[in-house]
Image: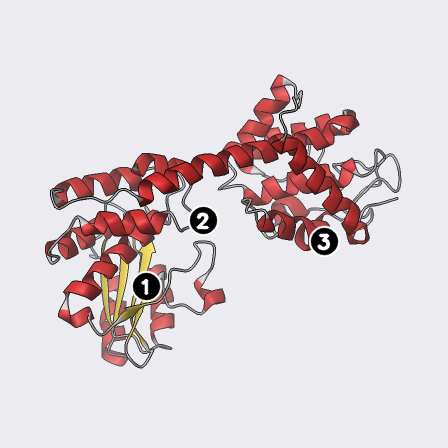
Amino acid sequence: MSVSVRDKQQIIVSLDDSLELAKSQQELNVIEHIARHLDAIFKNIDTATSGYLNLITCLICSSLNDEIDPRFHRKPGKGMPKPENPDGWFSGRTVSEKIIYPWMELKGFRTAKSGWQTRTYERPKPYTLDYPENIAIIKEPFLKTLDFATKNRSKRQSLVAYLFRKEIEYKGRKGKLVERVSKNNIGNEVLIIDIMSALERHFASPNSAHLPVIAIYSIYELLINEVDNYSVLSLRPLESHQASDLRTGSVGDIELEDLESDVIEGVEVKHGIEIDLPILLRAKEKILKSSLKRYYILTTHQSCAVINNDVLGVVRDVYATHGCQIIVNGVIPTIRYYLRMCSNPSEFINNYSKNIVTQDSVTADHLEIWK
């Protein structure tokens, strides 16, 4: 019998049992080379969240019935072959989206909305060792773990529990760091040069694309309180780093609105990307539909000055036809300039520390480095 959303109650029970096993002191007895594969997947969870959820879905579904092959993630047909047992497949995508994702989100575990929303995982082929799609950095551990689970049916729940135990340990570590960073108020003695050095080191950490956004947001919190031009403006809350501007309707990563709730200043932040013509053209499209007066495009790339005539042409054209001033600059030079305008630059550190602990995109490693 295949596994699908009709088996929701059994799937929830299996998830709950795996979590209780993870919380217990029971030895999981995961053999060393498989533990290394699971560690590799967990280490890359922030860049391979879909694959992580996908693996858990495969293991949980196949744990319900020994006849289910954890590699056969969709109904046979349309290119998908039959497993050895014709009914030994499961509806990976629907189970992932409708049952396992909501369960993991409820438990506060890192997860994607689905493990099957990209071509990488949705192909009508079983996840055998010769699976042709590029799963990037986790391909080998992902496929070898499922190969092991196929041959060792009794171990499937233990593999899930192993990953859940690591997630519990991660949450505990991050919680302690959040508490320490949150309580760390910096006095007036910090120099701007020290702040900039700390930020540059923090931005250089892995998977740090959201950190420059949080830094710019934190400096705006100071400007609103200290600079007259900003005193009548308010900051809209930071969106999730995973949320696209198209879906949220935002004009940028950061938005400031006036007393009429019109967004008149926006900021788009790029990490390690040089500002080119396509970026300006996408910005122009958003600006022309908006009430923006200023639009900043900031980057951490070392080449942040605009010298390309085509780019400059877009800047001039937008100002002439709409009235919005586009400013292209670097993240670090912008923060340095604004800090000089503030009476207590060290308050920026307190703001930044406060903000990074509230963002899901900030990992325990990011907090450790900042601490």
Q: Which circle's residue, 2 or 3, is located before the other in the chain?
A: 3
Q: Disc 1 marks which amino acid?
A: Leu
Relative to the observer, which residue lies in front, 100 or 213? 100
Q: Secondary structure at mark 2?
A: loop
The image shows residue 322 at horizontal and vertical percentages of 28, 79
Q: Disc 2 marks which amino acid?
A: Asp
What separation in Å lies between label 2 and label 1 (alpha carbons)? 29 Å
Q: Disc 3 marks which amino acid?
A: Thr
The residue under the point 16% across, 57% down is 338
Q: Secondary structure at mark 1?
A: helix
Relative to the observer, which residue lies in front, 309 or 254? 254
What is the crowding at mark 1: few (fewer than 14 residues within 10 Å), some, or many (at least 20)?
many
Q: Quadrant of residue 193?
A: top left
Q: Is residue 240 left or right of residue 86?
A: left
The residue under the point 35% across, 48% down is 356
Q: Quadrant of residue 13?
A: top right
Return the mark for residue 280.
1
Relative to the observer, which residue lies in front, 369 or 209? 369
The residue most toward the top is 32
Q: Which residue is under mark 3?
A: 94
What separation in Å lies between label 2 and label 3 (alpha carbons)? 25 Å
Q: Which residue is under mark 2?
A: 360
What is the crowding at mark 2: few (fewer than 14 residues within 10 Å), some, or many (at least 20)?
few
Residue 172 in view in this figure = yes
